[in-house]
Image (cartoon, rainbow, N blue to C red):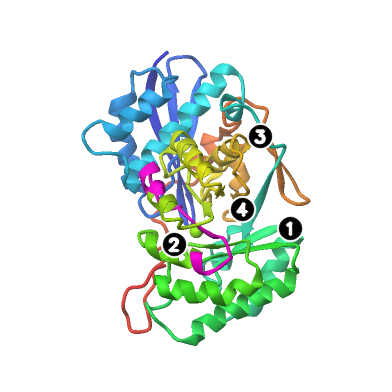
Amino acid sequence: MKITGIETHVCHARMRNWVFVKVLTDQAGLWGWGEATLEWHTRAVVGAIEDLSQLVVGEDPTRIEHLWQMMYRQHFWHGNGIVRGTAISGIDIALWDILGKIHGVPCHKLWGGPVRDSIRTYCHLGGGKMEDFYVTDPADAARFGELASQAVAQGFTAFKSMAVPATMPIEGLRPVRYAEACVRAMRDAVGESIDIMVDCHARPSPRMGLIMAKALEPYGLYWFEEPCWPESVAGLAEIQRAVATPIATGERLVGQHAFRELLEARGCSIIQPDVTHCGGLSEARRIAAMAEAYRLAIAPHNPQGPVSTAASLEFGFATPSYIICEAVHLDVPWRQDVVSEGFTVEPKGRIVRPSQRPGLGIEINEAEVRKHPFQQEIVLREFYADGAVGDW
Ligand SMILES: [Mg+2]
């Protein structure tokens, strides 16, 4: 059996262009789906997949590890940057889909079988609608409370918010009080049986991140995400030592070596590898094994498209430390039109039951994808009050 080609199918979904990767084989009707969505770098990733296809077209698709090693190590440059890492991930995910289809089993059965009966999911405030999640003003705490109530009404038992505003490297009390007011409004709205996460988007400096983490500690967050730049590993570790709140990070890291540094520094309690960026399902499984040795939880980053979600769920059904799946359901109203999914979501509690279909258990509707061709992603930028560049 041979790989005969690799196609990219770009689907414009407002904030993101979903990059679906289709690996074709010489066996009639046998192909695999992957995803390599990388916001604001769509053309670069599509080009990187074209470059990588030179290495794998003509090869046996069932030699996944061998092909992964080629994609990561050959042609001199390693695959540890975000563009190439994302391209490798998209192809790797599709290869696992193919292998599951060949053996007639869901991917999680290739990895030792299910380790749990169901997976809990969490949503973004507003279900992933850009304005509700990314643009809601932290000065408007009441809106956070309203959106939190909506998430619970939709059946979720956990949700994530962006309650920490962008700050200069050092600022005074005002942004801290904004964040406190937002989190208090959400807690008051949903009570203590619902889990609340706050994503800082690595906006704060390590010191501002620590101040925010301390200020929000009384609200019992399920986790506090990216409280400073991922490059500031020592800063992450200092914040994690300072609070009992679990720190979560890792969505921007590519490859096991980046995670090794984070783990060795005790920089977090929850790692968030993104299976579409970190090196695919192959590398996510290696990262999970390393994290297991530190007894850390895994909650993969997954705000992208439906192939990413299916891959994250298959990974979760085979990974003991996996605690919850990020789920976006309202980013575009036609999300379910582009995919047929093998797993089921129970409306009450938004619990996922495993797919019994082979591979990732999904099929992409290419005709629907073609209705949403590439468009430049909406530009989202951040500047401080003095005009200097901030982190979005
Ligand atoms: Mg995040």
Compared to residue 102, the image places residue 144 above or below, namely below
Q: Quadrant of residue 316?
A: top right
Q: Are marks 2 and 4 in contact (CB under 8 Å)?
A: no
Structural distance between the alpha carbons of marks 3 and 4: 33 Å
Badge 3: residue crowd in 10 Å (few <14, some 14–19, many ≥20): some
Residue span colored magenta: 241-260
Q: Earlier in the sequence, mark 2 or mark 4?
A: 2
Badge 1: residue crowd in 10 Å (few <14, some 14–19, many ≥20): some
Q: Are marks 3 and 2 in contact (CB under 8 Å)?
A: no
The numbered dot on residue 237 is 2
Amino acid at the residue labelled 1 = Gln
Q: Are marks 3 and 4 in contact (CB under 8 Å)?
A: no
Residue assigned mark 4: 333
From the viewer's side, name the closer residue of 290 and 74: 290
Quarter of the image with the C terminus is: bottom left
Tell me if the residue at label 3 has its CB under 8 Å from ligand 1: no
